[in-house]
Amino acid sequence: RVILTSKLYSNPWAEFKKGMMEFGESIEEIFTEIAKPFQYDPAVAETEIFKREKPNVKSAFHVMNYQKFYKASIEQRTLGKAFLAWSGIDELIASIVNSMYTGANYDEFLTMKYLLARHILQGDLKVEQIADYTDSDNMKSVVTTIKGISNDMEFLSTKYNRAGVHTYTLKPDQYIIVNAKFDAKMDVEVLASAFNMTKAEFMGRRVLIDSFGDIDADRLAELFADDPTYVALTAGEIAALDAIPAVIVDKDWFMVLDNLMEFTEDYNGQGLYWQYWYHAWKTFSVSPFANAVMFVVGTPSVTSV
């Protein structure tokens, strides 16, 4: 008897992705800053009627920076010796193919997690201090702080984005990423009220994470072995990330797109085996114009960049 065990994994942060980019390999994100005010004066208008006032337009470029593929070889003749029916072989082949999709989805999640971690450590997110959430007596104060920031993000401000442009994020566009320990301590109903949402509505805006610092270092090192821009997290950085209870991001903060998802196969007649490949090309970046704020217990070590 043979029992097959396999699970297809999906990226839990897939909702932050911007979809498929079938052509080209770069995106220009353009943000138009609010216009400046001028004092009305007819006398001045006589001399400045044709004076140019260029609009304050900023742009950021996001380039395809991730080209990976996954590979598997399947020898059906060899597999046939271990099964009593073709159905068993088909199930095993399906699980092997699924393992490539699972690997790609897991690597995508790891990369997004690493991307967030690096921007946190670089000081690219606005930092807000909260009381020690491990003490139940402080939970009311913690919720008050989070609600205050969430409310403030709905108004035009330059405080919460890296580019320092005037923008805002309405509550339906705010996503709160919370670590498992904080989520266990926090009453979801109470936190939902901070966002002026019902529990059901809030669950769609709450993204759970094991920990901001719990990153598969071995897998990342293998994934970016040939990437000179990759810097492994130190023990001190991981400890700092583990202490972060929550982050609020605008739904457009992550700039993650699929550039190519292609599955191919070929048969080796000499070796009597099938060769399968799954290519996954992506763009991993973040928007400097979108709001993002992190919460920390105690005085933050990095407040700006």
Image: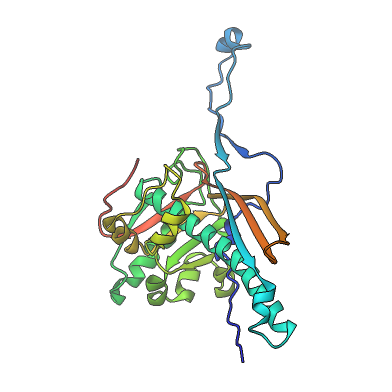
The residue at the far top in this view is 47
> 222 above or below 33?
below
Q: Is 23 or 143 nearer to us in this picture?
A: 23
State the residue at coordinates (38%, 51%).
120
Q: Where is residue 167 in the image (x, y as percent from the top left)?
A: 52, 43
Q: Where is residue 165 in the image (x, y as percent from the top left)?
A: 49, 37
Q: Is 170 or 28 nearer to us in this picture?
A: 28
Answer whether residue 33 is visible to the viewer in this image. Answer: no
The residue at the far bottom in this view is 1
Answer whether residue 228 is visible to the viewer in this image. Answer: yes
Q: Is 121 or 1 nearer to us in this picture?
A: 1
Q: How many labels does the image show?
A: 0
- What is the quadrant of the N terminus in the image? bottom right
Q: Is residue 182 left or right of residue 281?
A: left
Q: Is residue 237 left or right of residue 215?
A: left
> 26 above or below 139?
above
Image-quadrant location for residue 234:
bottom left
Image-quadrant location for residue 72:
bottom right
Q: Is residue 155 left or right of residue 50?
A: left
Q: Which colour scheme is used?
A: rainbow
- What is the quadrant of the C terminus in the image? top left
Q: Where is residue 40 in the image (x, y as percent from the top left)?
A: 56, 20
State the residue at coordinates (55%, 11%).
44
Q: Position of residue 112 (x, y in %)?
A: 50, 55
